[in-house]
Image (cartoon, rainbow, N blue to C red):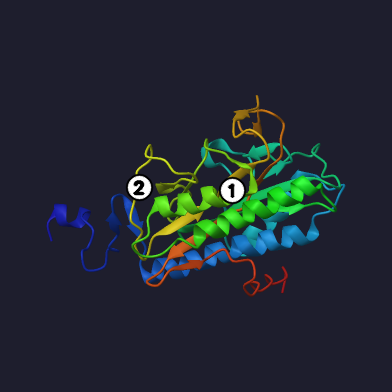
Amino acid sequence: MNFLSQLLPNRATAPRRRKIRGVEIKSAADIATMRQAARIVATVLREISELVKPGMSTLDLDAYAEERIRGLGATPSFKGYHGFPSSICACVNNQVVHGIPRQRQIIRRGDLLKVDTGAYFEGFHGDSCITIAVGEVSAQAQRLMEAAEAALYAGIGQVGPDKTLLDIAGAIEDCVTSYGFSIVEDFTGHGVGRNLHEPPSVFNFRTRQLPNLKLQPGMTLAIEPILNAGSKHTRTLSDRWTVVTVDKSLSAQFEHTVLVTETGYEILSDRTLTPLPQPMPTGS
Ligand code: MG
Ligand code: MG
C-alpha cells in the first residue's frame, strides 16, 4: 500500500453517499439513525407541551430540553449553531423565529408559544417545531395555530417519489390562503441529516426564485411553514436573533422532519409515537 492509498478512503468500507442535485439520499442505516434523532426531538417537544404552565420562563423550557436531549444520548443541535446560545428557539405571540430563551420572558396565560428544537444523535439531526396555546387563547390565535398545523400537513401530504418541492409549496400556499393568513417568505424549510440545514430549500409558497426538485426516496426534509395573522413581513431585533412580525401580529409555526419513502412519506418526528424509554436514574 503506497502513501497515497493510505490517505484515500477504503472503497470497500467507506460509506457511499449518493446525492441528487446536491441533496443527499440517505441509506437505510442513515434513516434508522435519523429516526432515533427525530424521535428524541418529538419526545422532548411532547413533554414540553405537557409541562408548560403560566409563570414559567422560556429559559426554564430551554433547561428542560437540554437536560432531556442529553439524557436521551443526543446533543442539542441548536446550541452553538452559528453562535446561537440555547437548545430551543422559544417565540411568544408576535415573535416569529429564533427567539432566545430568557429568564425574564415569563409565559402567560393566553400566549401563543412556539418551541423549536433539534437533536444530534450519532451523526444525524432531527428538527421539529410546535405551537402551544398556553391556557385559553384568542379565537384568532387558535385559528392561526390550526392553520399552521393544517398547512404543514397539507405540505407533507404532497411528499412522495416524483412529487416536487413546488407541489409541497403549492399545497401549503393554498391551505394558508384558504384561512386568510399570510406566509412568511423570509425563511424556508430545508434538507436535514448530517447537517441541521442542508440542501434543498423547502419553500412554503409558489416561486420560481428557488430551485425546484423532484423528490426521491431517501431524501429527508424539514418542512416548516410560518404563518402570520397580519403582514408577512418580519424584522430582526437588536439581539440579532429574535425575528418578529413588523405589524406586531401573531405568528405560528409547526415543523416536522419527513422522510421521502418509496410510496410517500414517513414523519420521523411524529409526536404520537411511543415515547422513548426514560433514561436510567444516575447512580444505578
Ligand atoms: Mg426547527
Ligand atoms: Mg428547521
Is 174 or 200 nearer to us in this picture?
Answer: 174
Q: Residue at x 20, y 57 (%)?
A: 6
The residue labelled by disc 2 is: 212
Mark 1 falls on what kind of element? helix
- Contact check, label 1 and label 2, Cβ < 8 Å: no
Q: Does 45 sit above or below residue 236?
A: below
Q: Name the kind of residue labelled 2 in the image.
A: Asn
Q: Does 56 sit above or below residue 272?
A: above
Quadrant location, the C terminus: bottom right
Is 192 or 187 nearer to us in this picture?
Answer: 187
Q: Position of residue 264 (x, y in %)?
A: 43, 69
Whether residue 144 is visible, yes or no, is yes
- Dot 2, how many residues are within 10 Å of its Cα: few (below 14), some (14-19), or many (20+)? some
| Left or right, 277 with reference to 166 | right
Q: Position of residue 197 (x, y in %)?
A: 46, 47
For marks 1 and 2, give the CA distance.
20 Å
- Dot 1, how many residues are within 10 Å of its Cα: few (below 14), some (14-19), or many (20+)? many
| Left or right, 161 with reference to 159 | left
Q: Residue at x 72, y 51 (%)?
A: 143
Q: Name the kind of residue labelled 1 in the image.
A: Val
Q: Does 28 sit above or below residue 16?
A: below
The residue labelled by disc 1 is: 176
Among all residues in the image, which is located at the extreme top?
Answer: 238
